[in-house]
Image (tube, rainbow, N blue to C red):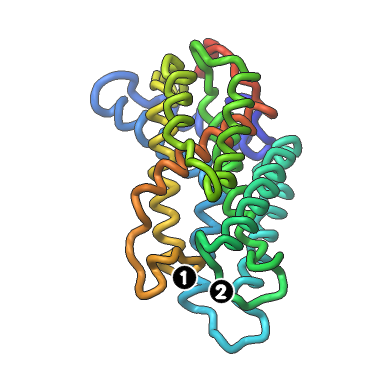
Amino acid sequence: MLNPTRLEARIDARARRLLARAPQTGWRGAAVEFAVFVAKQAWACVFGATLLLAIMLVRVLYPDDLPLTRNDLLTLIAVAIQVVMLATRLEAGREVWVIVLFHITGTVMELFKTDVGSWEYDAGGVLRIAGVPLFSGFMYAAVGSYLVRVYRLFDLGFVRYPPVWATAIVAAAIYANFFTHHWIWDLRWVLTAIVVLLWGATVMHARVWRRTIRLPLVPVFLGVAVFIWIAENIGTRFGAWQYPDQADGWQLVSLSKLSSWGLLMIISVVLVTLVYPPRPPIRRPIA
């Protein structure tokens, strides 16, 4: 595992001892690899999954008439989750800076998007900036937390990764387009084509346990975007925020949002490279 936190190193050592006798071939060996893959993904999602669970529980169980509003309670819960993850060494200190960048870039976009009516939150609460409750920034931070943890947990390496300076320019253009498309031509499909050209030849190497899987990077971007879209549907279903077409009753978030989340993934990946510069695959011992 690449640069694990102290807690993760202890968990990893125990897991290695448990898995040392696992079969290497056949369906049992494949089942072990799959179980490890799922466990690592779940571990990487701990911030986002906990926050999403809190959104669901607060929206269903928390009364409407208490002085502390749901939005403020969710903000306090999000802060508590972050503090616990730092205190228990679930996140490394240097990763927090990237997560803070996710928080800032996400909140700035939220302020703009709610102002132009792209989506809206409940009006209640004092822990907010304009129409944006502060817990919303933690939803972007949760994406950042997932990405940096996946990088560590799977010892990610890359073949034919594009120059970092080029990826930074594309990410800046994508972020700008989230704002400018309200006044000028929406460049999302041009930017999507550039993303495919830039990362199209890149192959990601991810070590599960004994096996290393090799995946083209662009479909991985899309896969993560799909999972974020699913989480977004859960969030809107429980009323954390809503889109204009959900004002008269909840419905699935438009599939067109997948393109937005796919492009947001590019911004996210570039921010993560500030902590973990992309590196070629490295052979590492299993035990």
Q: Amino acid at mark 1?
A: Gly
Q: Residue at x 65, y 25 (%)?
A: 276
- 157 above or below 11? above
- 127 above or below 176? below
Q: Amino acid at mark 2?
A: Asp
From the viewer's perspective, tell me whether residue 62 is left or right of residue 101. Answer: left
Residue 80 x %, y %: 68, 60
The CA distance from mark 2 to mark 1 is: 8 Å
Numbered circle sitting on residue 287:
none
Mark nearer the viewer, 2 or 1: 2
Q: Residue at x 27, y 28 (%)?
A: 28
Classed neighbour count for the residue bearing mark 1: other residues with Cα under 10 Å, few (<14), some (14–19), many (≥20): some
Q: Residue at x 44, y 17 (%)?
A: 203
From the viewer's perspective, tell me whether residue 59 is left or right of residue 13. Answer: left
Tell me the SS state at disc 2.
loop
Residue 254 x %, y %: 35, 54
Residue 204 x %, y %: 46, 20
| Observer-nearest of 19 and 161 | 161
Residue tagged 1: 239
Tell me the SS state at disc 1.
loop
Please report whichever mark, 2 or 1, sits nearer to the chain's N-terminal start: 2
Mark yes or no: residue 285 visible: no
- 114 above or below 40? below
Numbered circle sitting on residue 122:
2
Contact? badges 2 and 1 (CB < 8 Å):
yes
